[in-house]
Image (cartoon, rainbow, N blue to C red):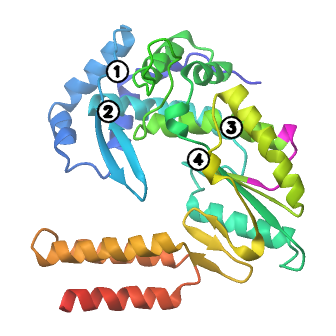
Amino acid sequence: MKVHKHIFDRLITPEHLFRSWEEFRKGKGSRKDVQEFEWKLEQNILSLSRDLRDRTYRHGPYSAFTICDPKQRRIHKATVHDRVLHHAIFSLLNPIFEPTFIAHSFSCRAGKGTHKAVTALEKWLRQVSRNCRYPCFALKCDIHQFFASVDHKILLSILNRKVKDADIMRLLTEVVGSFSSTELENERPRGIPIGNLTSQLFANVYLNEFDQFMKHSLRIRHYIRYTDDFVIVDTDRDRLEALIPIIGKYLSEELRLNLHPRKIILRKFGQGIDFLGYVILPHHRALRTRTKRRMFRKLKSRVDSFKTGAGSESSVECSLQSYLGVLSHANALCLSDQLQNQCWFWLRD
């Protein structure tokens, strides 16, 4: 296995940190904290470089807020100073770990994403069922509170297998240790914050252990994962049922994770396979009912904001086009027309 050394010296250069700033700044130029950092940009970047070089860098606190998209999530936002460093770390480490990931891991990777994941699953379902001529089943599982459950010690141990640089490992220990969801003092630190760019990489690195177990130890061919959701396709229902305790045992013993007991779903292809907001059926792809309702509700809220002067017409148009883009990945021509007609009706009402 190839290992990587002397990464830290590349990380701390002002040139690398300035490039990381440019990547971080995209789409955020109007935000107050970003503008304040940019006001003294050179001073801030050189200060960060100096703190890293002198080994005096300490990760700052997080500010927390809650979003509902669709389920409630607690987001932890680091300071601009720390987020620039997150980009710097990601840009150096991601090329190291990316080649180790399996092809059918679709979360937070260039050239992947939700729509490609759904398309890949749909292709497998049709392939395994021989175009719906034979029985085909899908086992869909979810890891319970994944981000809050990532074990710091295990994560750092996995990172250290390929990164043999004491300084970068010390820095990664600082970044990983800057957040913990653990409440008990004597409990091992756990948790990575939803909101950090580094958390996207750490999540893939952590669950790559599970991916490798599924593909190489269990030799499961039709396995696909998006963050903490994964699906296995097979012609044998009993074989899928037998996998559940094996998977649960591995996750618990090796990664200190647990399957969500209420989200272990085994269905026949003809019943529809719900994955990442879409329902894949033998002859078409539909939008999940909850997603459809949320789409109409949020668009109505945008229109109401515009009519009261709190929003703009362009924001309504952007939301509408975004939802039409989502619908374009399903067999939903009538629903697209309905959404547009309803939007114009709300605007005129």
Which one is in front in this view, the residue at disc 2 or the one at disc 4?
4
| 189 is higher (above) or lower (below) than 308 | above
Helix, strand or loop for disc 3? helix
Residue 21 visible from this viewpoint: yes
- Label 4 or label 1, whichever comes before in sequence order: 1
Kindly check if marks 2 and 1 are in contact, taking CB atoms under 8 A apart as contact. Answer: yes
Asked if the stretch drawn in magenta spans residue 219, the answer is yes
* Picture residue at 85% right of the left edge, 48% below the top: 242
The N terminus sits in image quarter: top right
Give the amino acid at mark 3.
Asn
* Picture residue at 84% right of the left edge, 70% below the top: 127
| 289 is higher (above) or lower (below) than 199 | below
- Label 2 or label 4, whichever comes before in sequence order: 2
Depth check, front residue: 194 or 290: 290
Residue 9 visible from this viewpoint: no
Residue behind mark 1: 59
> Gap in Å between the C-alphas at discs 2 and 3?
26 Å
Helix, strand or loop for disc 2? loop
Name the quadrant containing residue 113.
bottom right
Q: Which mark is residue 78?
A: 2
Depth check, front residue: 157 or 13: 157
* Picture residue at 47% right of the left edge, 86% below the top: 335
| Place of residue 336 in the rendered image (x, y in percent of width and height, measured from the top left) | 45, 86
> Gap in Å between the C-alphas at discs 4 and 3?
10 Å
Most extreme residue toward the front is 262
- Over which residues does the magenta segment extend? 216-223
> Gap in Å between the C-alphas at discs 2 and 4?
21 Å
| Place of residue 130 in the rendered image (x, y in percent of width and height, measured from the top left) | 88, 75
Residue behind mark 4: 227
